């Protein structure tokens, strides 16, 4: 999610929980920094949880 607009940017799969101080590149090549990580509740009978990562572009 883009922190300034609140719009989703892209879907990603993480093998582990992303660290709040990490930076990574989007598919477009833009370098972004993580602002906030929101962890949802798993669906009944599921182990996978939805995670929303809020990012801002790094300059």
Image (spheres, grey):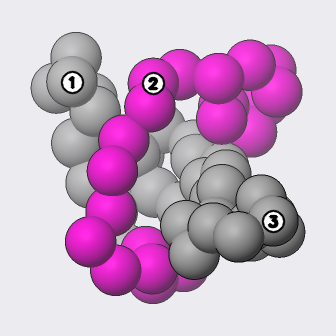
The one of 13 and 22 positioned closer to us in this rendering: 13
The residue to which callout 1 is attached is 27
Badge 1 local density, few (<14 within 10 Å), some, or many (20+)?
Answer: few
Which region is colored magenta?
1-21
The residue to which callout 2 is attached is 10
Q: Residue at x 74, y 19 (%)?
A: 7
Q: Residue at x 63, y 67 (%)?
A: 46
Q: Is residue 12 magenta?
A: yes
Q: Residue at x 66, y 56 (%)?
A: 50
The residue to which callout 3 is attached is 44
Q: Residue 34, position in %: x, y? A: 53, 61
Upstream in sequence: badge 2 or badge 3: 2
Tell me if label 1 and label 2 are in contact, CB under 8 Å.
Answer: yes
Is 37 situated left or right of 28 in this image? right
Q: Residue 19, position in %: x, y? A: 45, 82
Classify the position of the C terminus by image quarter: top left
Tell me if label 2 and label 3 are in contact, CB under 8 Å.
Answer: no
33 versus 42 height, above or below: above
Q: Is residue 50 magenta?
A: no
């Amino acid at each position: 999610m883009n922190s300034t607009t609140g719009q989703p940017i892209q879907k990603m799969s993480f093998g582990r929980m992303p660290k709040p101080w990490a930076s990574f590149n989007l598919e477009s090549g833009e370098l972004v920094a993580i602002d906030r990580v929101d962890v949802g509740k798993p669906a009944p009978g599921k182990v996978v949880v939805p995670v929303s990562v809020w990012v801002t572009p790094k300059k």
